[in-house]
Amino acid sequence: VIAVFCGQTPETYYIHHITMHHAEGNLPNDLSSTMKYQRDSRIAWLRYFFRFFFFILVDMTRYQVRKKRYPLLRKMLIGELSFYALTAAMMFVNWQATLVVFVVPFLAIRVLMMAGNWGQHAFIDPDDPGNDFKSAITCINARYNQRAFNDGYHISHHLVANRHWTDHPGELLDNIDAYRENDAIIFEGIDFFMVWLYLMLGRKDWLADRFVDLREEKRSKEEIIALFDRRLKKFSPEQLEAYRK
């Protein structure tokens, strides 16, 4: 089922998400890093999506070879290439059913995955991009959390990748001072996909309305948007090189 609806095997998802994305933490060596893009730009997101869509298998292969993780590389290639081969073969059996069951879900999931990752890592502190509190966001009181095992608590997820989903809300409450000290970006009532959509629509004012300001002295809407602008700005090649491991 996962292979059909995600276009990849469970091993491939684990290899990309845990052994690469979480290991690199959205820094320049992360193949899905958002740092080099202007994160409120529709053109930048399209560039980000198409690079991932067409080159992620090649990039991941190079990454795993560089890390000398050959067993993981073998599992990844078997999973991805088997899915493509199965889809191609089924097109000759019943192309209409194959489009509905394999191709359309594959395309939809890839778009949603990249839109979600963009929303999760859109607001990066230029002075501390390796800080999970300042490179990821948290979405609370959203229906999406009820359906997706509290996936909205993305800062908590990056702090401890294997934290049980029921523990995320408690982690936020227990460490609220750390969230406040790091000026973490928290939204209420929306999910990552809505964050992505509002950015693509240029509606940072809508995002400001849903921003949870943890400071005792609350900021104005203009000050919140100024915070967004600072954290949405793309990193220069020199900045990227400085944070490259």
Image (tube, rainbow, N blue to C red):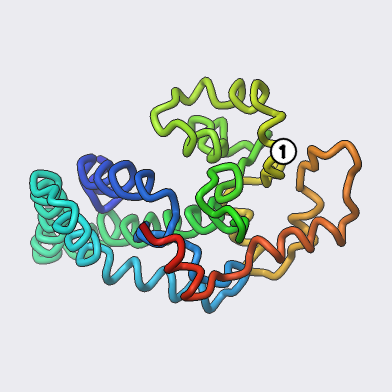
Q: How many marks?
A: 1
Q: Is residue 179 left or right of residue 46?
A: right
As drawn, is 244 to the left or to the right of 6?
Answer: right
Identify the amino acid type marked 1: Glu
Q: Residue at x 14, y 57 (%)?
A: 65
Between 83 and 174, the one lying in front of the other is 174
Q: Position of residue 154 (x, y in %)?
A: 53, 40
The answer to whether residue 121 is left or right of residue 206 is left
- Residue 180 in percent (x, y) is at 73, 37
- Residue 96 picture quarter: bottom left
Residue 1 sits above or below residue 244 on the image: above
Q: Is residue 216 left or right of residue 144?
A: right
Residue at x 57% of width, y 34% of height: 145
Q: Does residue 15 lie above or below 117 as drawn? A: above
- Residue at coordinates 90% horizontally, 54% vertically from top-left? 220
Q: Quadrant of residue 152?
A: top right
Q: Farthest front residue? A: 242
* Crowdedness near tag 1: few (<14), some (14–19) or many (≥20) residues, C-alpha within 10 Å: few
Q: Position of residue 116 (x, y in %)?
A: 50, 53
User: Going 57% across and 70% down the picture, which residue do you hit?
Assistant: 234
- Tell me the element at label 1: helix
Looking at the rendering, which quadrant does residue 95 occupy? Answer: bottom left
In x, y percent, where is residue 47?
44, 76
- Looking at the rendered image, the quarter that the N terminus falls into is top left
Q: Nearer the viewer, residue 98 or 212?
A: 212
Q: Which residue is mark 1?
A: 181
- Compared with 149, 192 (above or below) is below
Quarter of the image with the C terminus is bottom left
